[in-house]
Amino acid sequence: MGDVMARQGMSQDAIAANLFEGHYPRLAGWCRRLVDDDGTAHEIASEAFTRLLTKLSKVDDPVGYLYVIAANLVRDHWRRVERERRALQREAAQPPDTERVPGSGIEIRSLIDALPDRLRVTVLLHYFADYPIREISRLTGRAEGSIKSDLHHARKALRQALESSEAPR
Amino acid sequence: MNDDDLDLQRFLPPVRPLMPPDGSFERIVLTASRRRRRRLMLSVATSVSVVAIAVAGVVIARTQFSSNNGGPVSAAVLPPTSHATQPTHAPMSTNAGGVTQSGTIVPDPSADAPSVTNAKCPVDELGLTLTPARKAIVGTAAYEGLVVVFTNQGSAPCHLSDYPGVMLMGDSGPLNAARGGTVMWQDPGPAYVTLAPRGSASAGLEWRTGVAGCSTVYTAAQVTPPDTFVQFGVRLPVPIASCPNGGVAVTRLTAGTAGPVLQP
């Protein structure tokens, strides 16, 4: 897309403004669905845009790049939150939080967070950013077959986790 | 329910666009511009260092050559047959520097420093080794460490930057090493590390030992080079006994195979 706009004679500034206007709201909304508040969603979306604009002329697919960066930042945010939650529990000497609502946003986030990195990014891009397998393959530099296999393993793991959390206790 | 029927989206609310706060685009452009400038300055500083090292190498090579021949050497004053009177240790081939048969001074290519590169190291040209580091006592806590070493096995210089990913594998499940916040290593800070062919970059991995109740043993790891999704599966040279919920951290990469500087 960056190439296309460059070929159309747009300056880097104009390309950046165009991308921001066209994609920031959805990217921030996508982040908001995965984090707990608007502020964090804006922080992640802004950081993804900052990284994109730092190397805009070298990125072939700016929108795909934005979502890959944002997925990684969301993952880092989840890790940080989880570390802080555990530290607080240790401080308070409380048992682990078992009061999560099965199937809720929080629950599914923690289940996705528990996936290995490779599966997690693939799931975030495919299920939560609507990227087709071919696009994910291109963005991550991995074969389409590997992406399909990752999604299969992720679905299996998530289904098992969801079924066990939804089972009557 | 078939695996492929799993509808994850139903567990989360639909995407609702969030409009940017006022002035956010301008802030983003400004921050990106500062980062570009900082990166450029870093790149220029690296280039200057590399050129300085290369020049120093050539000067030293020429000085040594001159001293081997009893004084300054000029290509113009060397007799055409000078090679016949050169000492046996004087280089005669154009590959090793010195004076050729035609009397031309050729700088030693080995004195050339690797060129600065913007190419990220291709994963399939990276080697990975883990080596034990010395143990450290910090305050009342004991720490052990490993040095995670990436080696450029390709023929061209390339760069790595920031943190590698390290996920420890044990019987009770995986554990991701925290990035930064190490106690025994000094984090080298953000920098691009240029790896010449066969050059290395390394990071310090540490874990706290001897904590009551923290005896989860990890015997293998999956290591991800920075900015990639590819994981190297490796067996650990020493088993790591740590808390199952943390206590393991990794530093950014630094040049060489020794890892970052240990805390004093």
Image: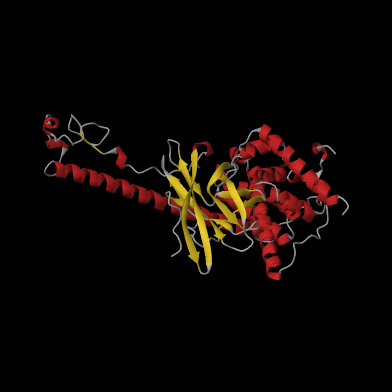
The x and y percentages for residue B60 are 24, 47
The x and y percentages for residue B118 are 47, 44
Q: How many marks?
A: 0
Q: Can residue A29 be seen in the rendering of this structure? A: no
Q: Is residue B71 left or right of residue B31?
A: left
What residue is rendered at 12% in x and 35% in y? B78
Q: Quadrant of the N terminus of chain A?
A: top right
The x and y percentages for residue B140 are 53, 69
Placement of B256 over or under B125, stated as above or below:
below
**Which of the 4 image quadrants contains residue A8?**
top right
Q: Is residue B44 left or right of residue A101?
A: left
B177, B163: nearer the viewer:
B177
What residue is rendered at 59% in x and 59% in y? B247
**Which of the 4 image quadrants contains residue B1?**
top right
Snapshot colouring: secondary structure
B214, B221: nearer the viewer:
B214
The x and y percentages for residue A98 are 79, 60
Placement of B139 over or under B64, stated as above or below:
below
A16, B245: nearer the viewer:
B245
Q: Quadrant of the C terminus of chain A?
A: bottom right
Q: Can residue B194 be seen in the rendering of this structure? A: yes
What residue is rendered at 88% in x and 52% in y? A168
Q: Is residue B151 left or right of residue A130?
A: left
